[in-house]
Image (cartoon, rainbow, N blue to C red):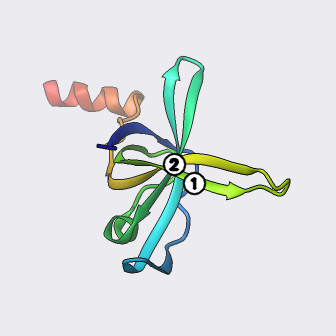
C-alpha cells in the first residue's frame, strides 16, 4: 500500500484552480510545495497535487501549516538533453490546515491578567 503522511508549511500560495480531462473524466486540480522540517536548519521540500473537492475547497496560503495524506507518485519525462528523468510528488487524498499558534505579545499577557482578576 502506498500511503504517505507529511506535515509542513506552504512555501507559496497554491496554484490557481485548473480543470482538465483525464482517464476518469473531468477533474479540477491545484499544486503547491511544502517545507517539512527535518532538522534545525534543514527542510525537505515536497511538491503536492490535490484534486477535485479538496482542490476546490483548499483555503491554505503561503506560510500555513498543513498535514497531507496521500500517495507518492513518480513523474517520468524526457529532458531537453534527451535523457529520461523523473521526480516524485505527493498526490494528496486529504489536506488538513493546522491552527495557527497565537502570537505572544503584550496583548496576550494583558488578556491573561484580565481573565484571572
Image depth: mark 1 or mark 2 in front: 1
Q: Give the left or right position of residue 61, taking residue 75 as reference.
A: left
Residue 41, horizontal then vertical, whole percent: 60, 19
* Residue pictured at 50% horizontal, 27% vertical: 37
Of mark 1 and mark 2, the one earlier in the sequence is 1
Is 52 or 73 nearer to us in this picture? 73
* Residue pictured at 85% horizontal, 53% vertical: 81
Q: Is residue 116 above or below residue 3?
A: above
Is 12 or 92 nearer to us in this picture? 92
**Placement of the N terminus among the 4 image quadrants:** top left
The residue beneath circle 2 is 89
Identify the element where label 1 is drawn.
strand
Residue 57, horizontal then vertical, whole percent: 34, 67
Is 66 or 63 nearer to us in this picture? 66
Residue 97, horizontal then vertical, whole percent: 34, 49
The residue beneath circle 1 is 75
Q: Is residue 90 above or below residue 43?
A: below
Crowdedness of circle 1 by 10 Å Cα count: few (<14), some, many (20+)?
Answer: few
Q: Give the left or right position of residue 59, taking residue 112 as reference.
A: right
* Residue pictured at 83% horizontal, 57% vertical: 80
Crowdedness of circle 2 by 10 Å Cα count: few (<14), some, many (20+)?
Answer: some
In space, the residues marked 1 and 2 are separated at their CA atoms by 8 Å
The answer to whether the residues at label 1 and label 2 have Cβ atoms under 8 Å apart is yes
Is 52 or 85 nearer to us in this picture? 85
**Placement of the C terminus among the 4 image quadrants:** top left
* Residue pictured at 38% horizontal, 48% vertical: 71
Residue 94, horizontal then vertical, whole percent: 31, 54
Q: Is residue 97 above or below residue 59?
A: above
Amino acid at each position: 500500500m502506498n500511503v504517505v503522511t507529511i506535515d509542513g508549511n506552504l512555501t507559496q500560495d497554491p496554484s490557481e484552480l485548473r480543470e482538465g480531462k483525464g482517464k476518469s473524466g473531468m477533474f479540477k486540480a491545484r499544486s503547491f510545495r511544502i517545507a517539512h522540517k527535518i532538522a534545525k536548519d534543514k527542510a525537505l521540500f515536497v511538491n503536492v497535487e490535490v484534486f477535485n473537492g479538496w482542490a476546490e475547497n483548499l483555503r491554505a496560503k503561503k506560510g500555513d501549516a498543513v498535514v497531507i495524506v496521500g500517495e507518492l507518485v513518480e513523474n517520468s519525462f524526457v529532458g531537453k538533453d534527451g535523457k529520461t528523468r523523473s521526480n516524485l510528488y505527493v498526490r494528496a487524498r486529504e489536506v488538513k490546515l493546522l491552527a495557527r499558534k497565537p502570537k505572544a505579545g503584550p496583548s496576550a499577557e494583558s488578556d491573561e491578567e484580565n481573565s484571572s482578576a
